[in-house]
Image (cartoon, rainbow, N blue to C red):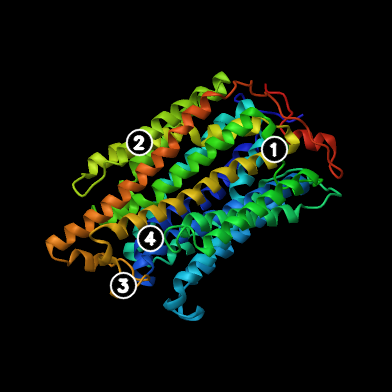
Amino acid sequence: MVQVSRDGARPNVRVILFGLMIAMMLAMLDNMIVNTALPRIVGEFGGLNHFTWVVTAYVLGTTVSTPIWGKLGDLYGRKNVFLSSVGLFLLGSALCGMAGSDLLGGPEVGMVQLIAFRAVQGLGAGGLMVGVMAIIGDLVPPRERGRYQGLIAGSMAIAMVAGPLVGGFITDHLSWRWAFYVNLPVGGVALLLLIATLKLPRYRTEHRIDWLGAALLSVGITAIVLITTWGGNEYPWGSPQILGLVALAVVSLVVFGFVERRAVEPILPLGLFANRNFALISAVGFLLGFAMFGAMSFLPLYQQTVQGASATGSGLLLMPLMFGMLLVSLVVGRAITRTGRYRIYPIVGGVVMTAGMLLLTRLDVGTGKVESSLYMIVLGVGMGFLMQTSMLIAQNSVEQKDLGAASGAATFFRSIGGSFGISLFGAVFARRLADSAAGGTFASGGGEGAGVDLEQLRQLPAQAQQLVLGGLADAISHVFLWAVLFTVAVPVLAWFLREVPLRTENEARASTDTGSEQAEAALGRAPVS
């Protein structure tokens, strides 16, 4: 029998949790560092109209890989699968840092390379996020998960605070390339710690991975993201390119549905959606991804251009949002563990998040930093109510054998929401900016690939500078107005959730090469003393 402490945590859980928190911070830290460095990257490589693809490629890679990583963990055990995802993430990080260097062809191809390497990085990140949540699900029963997932959410919030600060410092004092290279030593520590401490049962199965389903899902998602990115921007909505993508998306997703119904081990088990809570919380996660990634992508751009902040200053200005999310995530996690009740939190979170988005629509050239910080606190509080509560509800809605698939699906819908959100918001931003009086200022000779040179912008005559800043502020606030259309649905959907009691222990899973005692110990079946 495994001995436990008074708070119910097994002795190795805290050590493992530390390693998992580092791994989760890798994905979140990198994304926040890059957001802060993006204006500088665009200034070097050009491509303002495509800058959101640096984020979209990462999120898209995360999205398409998440269900695959989750299912691989269910079938073959989580440790080796999880460590492989960490290794792939670090490889992508190294390649991103080398993008556009003389070794790889120079700055002329820098933006294309960076987008491609960010996709590789995202493929690894998908395994990081779903792996952390599924491993916690293996080690800790649902009733206790609120506290531990609250800590994970706290580490994510810390990464979101540290990311802009580290990214700003790196961008201002070193090179934006170190925004990616910094992942290597941090990831190395996480790898060593988890290799030494993470002990989970190994699973073997005669079934095969549903590669056809995975390929069809990836094609369908990519087509939809391209539609939202290019439609009405690169190509007219009725153009052959957009109509072809629509046909590709419809056909691939319809065929995917047929394949999943017949697959022995479907990559995304459609039967999970027969559970009311799982279906609702998946929709909530989708909308949360819209809001979260949208805010993270455009706030640094507003701060560094309109408000004139440095890259480091932009990181500091994001701290109120992160502080609100960190504090609320920790409080909500402990409250769920203590009471076992959770339904009210996504409802309140949806209302508060919508209020935060509404406030951000008020951003303009004259908005002060204190005022914008108050708006961000409101948004962060709303996100704090939702971040880990959505994962907890998803995991509690399924059997233990489907834990990886459920964690993967929950992460998948949040990521696909982010993919669509960033693509849609990027298109809205580009169109609004192009239609403004300042639109022509961002193209060098009308060229689409020109970047925003912040120093050159500040050297413009006062009248021209105000025109440019006004166009940027208007385009960014318009993005948040569109976000409200999606966040307002969150509390409505959450209202229909059922308060299903949280399980107080996990179900043991059968293993063909691991004894039942080892499996039960690893899965947290030891009674709490």
Q: Which kind of residue does numbered mark 4 sit on?
A: Ala
Question: Spatial distance from mark 1 to mark 3, Cα to Cα?
Answer: 52 Å
Question: Spatial distance from mark 4 to mark 2, Cα to Cα?
Answer: 25 Å
The location of residue 107, given as percent across then percent down, is: 42, 77
Question: Residue 403 bears which disc, if any?
Answer: 1
The location of residue 415, given as percent across then percent down, is: 54, 47
Question: Residue 356 bears which disc, if any?
Answer: 2
**Contact between labelled residues 2 and 3, with CB atoms less than 8 Å apart:** no
Q: Is residue 125 visible?
A: no
Question: Spatial distance from mark 4 to mark 3, Cα to Cα?
Answer: 25 Å
Q: Which kind of residue does numbered mark 3 sit on?
A: Gly
The location of residue 486, given as percent across then percent down, is: 45, 39
Q: Which kind of residue does numbered mark 1 sit on?
A: Leu
User: Which badge, 4 or 2, comes first in the chain's sequence?
Assistant: 4
Question: Spatial distance from mark 4 to mark 1, Cα to Cα?
Answer: 36 Å
- Name the residue furthest front: 238
User: Which badge, 1 or 2, comes first in the chain's sequence?
Assistant: 2
Mark 3: which secondary structure?
helix
Which mark is nearer the camera, 1 or 2? 2
Query: Residue 17 or 218: which is nearer the viewer?
Result: 218
The residue drawn where x is 49% and y is 39% is 287
Is the N terminus in the top left, top right, bottom left or bottom right quadrant?
Answer: top right
Q: How many marks do you count on the picture?
A: 4
User: Which badge, 4 or 3, comes first in the chain's sequence?
Assistant: 4
Question: Spatial distance from mark 3 to mark 2, Cα to Cα?
Answer: 36 Å
Q: Residues within 10 Å of mark 4 (few under 14, many from 20)?
A: many
Q: Residues within 10 Å of mark 3 (few under 14, many from 20)?
A: few
Which mark is nearer the camera, 4 or 2? 2
Side of 70 where 426 appears, left or right: left
The location of residue 221, given as percent across then percent down, is: 59, 53
User: Which badge, 1 or 3, comes first in the chain's sequence?
Assistant: 1
Disc 4: which residue: 37
